[in-house]
Amino acid sequence: MNMTSFRRQGEWLVTTVDALNEQGASIDPDRYPPLRAGSHPHIVRQRLLALALFPEKWVNRLFSVGGIQCTDQSILLRAFEPADKQKELSYRLAQLPAAHERCEAPVLYEDDWCVVFDKPSGMPVHPNGPGHRGTLDEAAARYALLRGDPLPMKHIHRLDDDTSGPVLYAKNELAQLRLDESMREKRIDREYEAIVQGQLRNFSGKIDAPIGKDRHHGARRRVSPGGDHAVTHYEVVRQGSGWARLRLRLETGRTHQIRVHMSHIGHPLAGDDLYGGRTEVIRHQALRGARLTFPHPFTGDPVQVDCPEPAWFSSLAAKLAL
């Protein structure tokens, strides 16, 4: 379906009565009569569902809260509802005054529907315990508040605390539904770079090994026959004396997947002491997100976001001649 007739107008996603009627040329007019100026929201809801432009769950929720309107010539859908006012106030009071404590994340891509942040190494995506401060979720909420557009920012995927790179956020409920579906259908592609110990015999390969919890260590994961399906693809970018720089792509998104898989084949990440990596060259795992590709949550068009190489990764690669 053609989505170009829709535009944002404050809290509303707006199109015209004529545009929706034109898109419904193949719809049974007896069952779904054409829209007219001032059509009842129920009639608009029926037509939206027949056109299958949006998830049924979302359309029905909008209708139930008065989020569908029809004026003389326009159809309005309340797609850009601000975040909960109490949460907004809490973020403003708790976060905005603490300028010296802030750890910001650069924006790599943004539009009305989603935003991609460049998460620094050492910043958690979300709180790991009571009172935890300095998360990417907080930085995202603060960013929206300071721009005067306090939409409910929700992360779609995560990175380990010490892994840097792009993290995708939905800016409204419709975007979240669509992007969550893309994650489930494995249509969000994540590419990484890592520096690992040793030299690999094969310059490319696929690691297909299930990952489960390590019952002897709460924070660790391990390759286990009873674990969850996990597949990692790797390619050698450059090899040096005792170290290698890799490009990796995930088919699945298990906790610590790259770290577990590389350790499993005898090439733990530099600095990753949890999985056997040496720490004399760096104090955290040498892993960064390099590229994120996803279908846009509104248009469906492919979006590719490249993440600049952080200084710590460049410095380590130079030090190891990689």
Image: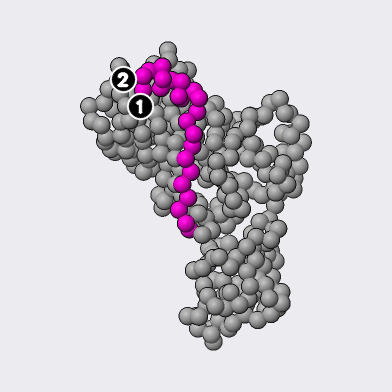
Give percent across and percent down for residue 231: 33, 40
Which residue type does callout 1 highlight?
Answer: Arg
Give percent across and percent down for residue 71: 71, 74
Kindly report the distance in space between the C-alpha atoms of the residues bearing marks 2 and 1.
Answer: 8 Å
* Front-lying residue, 127 or 278: 278
Residue under pointer 2: 240
**From this viewpoint, which residue is outermost toward the left?**
201
Which residue type does callout 2 highlight?
Answer: Gly
Region rendered in magenta: 300-322
Residue in the picture at 41% in, 16% down? 319
Answer with left or right where residue 312 lies relative to residue 35: left
Judge whether residue 6 can be spotted in this image: yes
Residue in the picture at 62% in, 80% down? 35
Mark 1 crowdedness (10 Å alpha carbons): few <14, some 14-19, many ≥20 = many
Return the disc, 2 or 1, that comes first in the chain's sequence: 2
Give percent across and percent down for residue 222: 36, 30
**From this viewpoint, which residue is outermost toward the bottom?**
30
| Residue 314 inside the magenta-drawn segment | yes
Residue in the picture at 47% in, 40% down? 306
- Contact flag, marks 2 and 1 (Cβ < 8 Å): yes
Give percent across and percent down for residue 74: 67, 72
